[in-house]
Amino acid sequence: MTHIQTENLAALKNQLNQLNLEEGLHFITKAFSTGVTFSSSFSFEDQAITHAILSQELTIDIFTLDTGRLFAETYSVWNNTNERYHKNITAYFPQQQALEKLVAEKGPNSFYESADNRKECCFIRKVEPLKRALAGKNVWITGVRSEHSLARTGLEIVEWDEANQIIKYNPLLHWSTEDVKNYISKHNIPYNILHDKGFISIGCAPCTRAIKAGEDFRAGRWWWEDNSKKECGLHSR
């Protein structure tokens, strides 16, 4: 980034730090008339942001990454969201050849065998499709919260994503889990019922389980790996 870009990012960060969710999203659409996009996994957080975008009829594109291994409940909340807001959320899928090669060479569950295999699967199913979704965009809005994992505690509400060459806006970064649940309840927003069954962070079905009492927030994702490795690459710094 140039010195001028760095200064502009700092000014944007200062402004957005003073605004609530709805105000911040509205401000972003005024600051960037085009090229603002939001990635949804239909989690609690993402459903809150989706509601704030669509209820205000903001000019923000919404997309999701369909890895091909999502829970049935995730597809249900996706469909319910389309119906509630009369909006068809765009889906990005893994590239056919890369996925077929992976499965042919290593089988459908290679991600259980090593962290490298799991990251390879995540790259094909999530990271590469994300890069296509973000190509040519100016701002990427996410539902990331600092409570999600230790790796995310150092994130800022607005930052430069070097890997994707894009401004990244994390409007719920400092929200607590209760803040998110209260917002969902207040606005009667469709949500994934797996959240009521102990699933906190919901991703692909083979890589996600409910957490047990006393377990860490991130324990339900890639539970066979060391905590330091529990990122899929979408939000790597």
Image (cartoon, grey):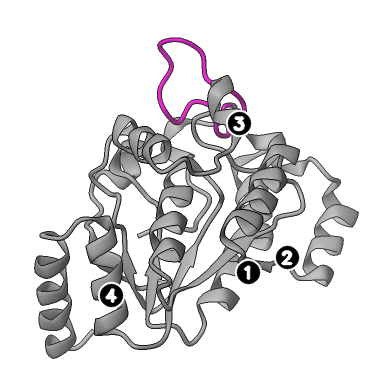
Residue on which the image places disc 4: 28
Of tags 1 and 3, the one toward the viewer is 3
Q: Eyeballing the image, is 175 above or below 36?
A: above
Q: Residue at x 50, y 62 (%)?
A: 39
Q: Are marks 3 and 2 in contact (CB under 8 Å)?
A: no
Q: Secondary structure at mark 2?
A: loop
**Is residue 166 found left or right of 203 in the rendered image?**
left
Q: Are marks 1 and 4 in contact (CB under 8 Å)?
A: no
Three-letter amino acid code of the residue under disc 2: Pro
Residue 65 seen from this side: yes
Residue on which the image places disc 2: 94
Earlier sequence position, callout 4 versus callout 3: 4
Of tags 1 and 4, the one toward the viewer is 4
Q: Are marks 4 and 3 in contact (CB under 8 Å)?
A: no
Question: For the magenta stretch, what is the residue range?
Answer: 209-223
Q: Residue at x 49, y 26 (%)?
A: 219
Res. 129 mark: 1
Three-letter amino acid code of the residue under disc 3: Ile
